[in-house]
Amino acid sequence: MAKISSDRKGIEEHILRLLVPQEILASFELNQIIENDTELLFDLIEKESCIPKELAGKEAVLNGYMNVTTLQSFPQNGKQCYIHLRRRRWKEKGSIDNKAYNNEYEFTASGTMATKSFGAFLKRNSLIAIPSHIAQSLQ
């Protein structure tokens, strides 16, 4: 059955779902898109609603961000395509020990920094991933 998007917001969300894997969009939202002559980077931030299980039922507050993870995805329009993930770090409000909590995700193909689907494609076609210059400048 065909998926049809006809309003502006629906079209934008539809295009994003075509470019970024669904499993990532379940926990992350688009912050910005950066493009240069050779690269396209989707910068995503973990949704505020994704509080770690260890803090379920407790009052959690944002405690900064983890180190950024950059995944390589399928090239788009002749440009290398990257997905930049910013995971949130949380703590329990009023906690004395200030222990930090975060979510762990399995978005990469084993032994790579490629999305699972792109990693499977690379494995089938023996291509080599090239690191992103845009992503390195954002860290």
Image (cartoon, helix red, strand yellow):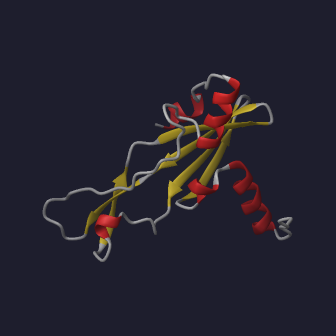
Residue 128 shown left or right of residue 106 in the figure: right
- The reply to whether residue 33 is visible in this rendering is yes
Which residue is at the far left? 96
Image quadrant in which you'd find residue 35: top right
- Position of 106 relative to 92 (above/below): above
Residue 58 shown left or right of residue 12 in the figure: left
User: What residue sits 71% from the left and 28% below the top?
Assistant: 38
- Position of 120 relative to 21 (above/below): above
Residue 89 shown left or right of residue 79 in the figure: left
Asked whether 111 or 102 is in front, the reply is 111
- Position of 9 relative to 137 (above/below): below
Give how far across and how far down residue 128 sits, in percent: 62, 22
Asked whether 32 or 70 is in front, the reply is 70
Give how far across and how far down residue 82 sits, in percent: 62, 38
- The reply to whether residue 81 is visible in this rendering is no
Asked whether 36 or 25 is in front, the reply is 25
Give how far across and how far down residue 53 sits, in percent: 34, 66
Which residue is at the far front? 124
Image quadrant in which you'd find residue 15: bottom right
Q: Which image quarter is the N terminus in?
A: bottom right
User: What residue sits 32% from the left and 72% below the top?
Assistant: 56
Which residue is at the far bottom? 57
User: What residue sits 28% from the left and 75% below the top?
Assistant: 58
Give how far across and how far down residue 131 sits, in percent: 57, 26
Count of residue discs = 0
User: What residue sits 63% from the left and 29% below the top?
Assistant: 123
Residue 3 shown left or right of residue 13 in the figure: right
